[in-house]
Image (cartoon, helix red, strand yellow):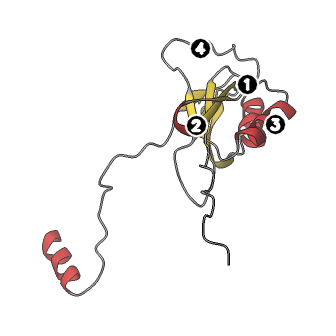
């Protein structure tokens, strides 16, 4: 029956909306934090993320962050347990780093330094990319990558 209705709607020119997405998509990593307010300042004031949603989670909260509320894309989910005296987060050997593409690495480095963070020196890597790393307040490592735009080709058109 459902298939018949979809065929009739398609023949009549109505768009048929799929009932489920066709491929998986990444929402983002979920990171525990020892002090959610400190982490939120890093992610919003220094990385430029916005709070997409806040959800209660027992005595704590879950905060979903992204770079835009209007254009959803993968983001970061912060998990706070509501205890301001939480134990420090201990990094294991499973998560290496989270990689971000940024449009202006120099500006990001300055923003982080102005906030008291210590990004690594910016270095050139393969194929016109530059990168640096920085740790958030709980020690999660972020690799930031910028693709340099190739220099414009000189205009060799004949002068008139």
Q: CA distance from mark 4 to mark 3?
A: 26 Å
User: Considering depth in this image, is 70 or 101 the residue closer to the camera?
Assistant: 101
Residue 159 position by quadrant? bottom right
User: Considering depth in this image, is 154 or 104 the residue closer to the camera?
Assistant: 154
Disc on res. 121: 1
Q: CA distance from mark 2 to mark 4?
A: 28 Å
Number of residues whose C-alpha sits closer than 10 Å to that of mark 3, classed few (under 14), some (14–19) or many (20 or more): some
Measuring 73% from the left and 25% from the top, which residue is drawn there?
A: 121
Residue 123 percent location from the top left of the image: 66, 28
Numbered-mark total: 4
Which mark's residue is nearer the viewer, 1 or 3?
1
Number of residues whose C-alpha sits closer than 10 Å to that of mark 1, classed few (under 14), some (14–19) or many (20 or more): few
| Secondary element at tag 4 | loop
Q: CA distance from mark 2 to mark 1?
A: 14 Å
Name the residue tied to disc 3: 110
| Secondary element at tag 1 | loop
Measuring 77% from the left and 42% from the top, which residue is drawn there?
A: 107
Q: Are marks 2 and 4 in contact (CB under 8 Å)?
A: no
Please tell me which of labels 2 and 1 falls first in the chain.
1
Disc on res. 129: 2
User: Considering depth in this image, is 144 or 141 the residue closer to the camera?
Assistant: 144
Residue 38 appears left or right of 33: right
Please tell me which of labels 1 and 3 falls first in the chain.
3
Which mark's residue is nearer the viewer, 2 or 4?
2
Please tell me which of labels 4 and 1 falls first in the chain.
4
| Secondary element at tag 3 | helix
Q: In this picture, is 39 found above or below 20?
A: above
Residue 17 position by quadrant? bottom left
Number of residues whose C-alpha sits closer than 10 Å to that of mark 4, classed few (under 14), some (14–19) or many (20 or more): few
Name the residue tied to disc 4: 91
Q: CA distance from mark 4 to mark 1?
A: 22 Å
């Amino acid at each position: 029956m459902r298939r018949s209705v979809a065929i009739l709607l398609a023949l009549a020119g109505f768009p048929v909306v799929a009932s489920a997405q066709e491929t998986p998509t990444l929402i983002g990593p979920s990171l525990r934090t020892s002090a959610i307010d400190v982490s939120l300042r890093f992610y919003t004031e220094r990385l430029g993320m916005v709070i997409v949603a806040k959800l209660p989670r027992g005595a704590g909260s879950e905060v979903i962050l992204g770079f835009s509320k209007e254009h959803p894309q993968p983001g970061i989910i912060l998990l706070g347990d509501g205890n301001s005296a939480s134990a420090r987060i201990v990094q294991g050997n499973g998560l290496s780093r989270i990689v971000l593409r940024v449009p202006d690495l120099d500006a990001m480095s300055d923003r982080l330094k102005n906030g008291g963070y210590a990004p690594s020196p910016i270095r050139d890597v393969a194929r016109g990319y530059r990168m640096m790393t920085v740790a958030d307040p709980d020690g999660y490592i972020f690799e930031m990558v910028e693709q340099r735009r190739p220099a414009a080709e000189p205009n060799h058109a004949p002068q008139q």
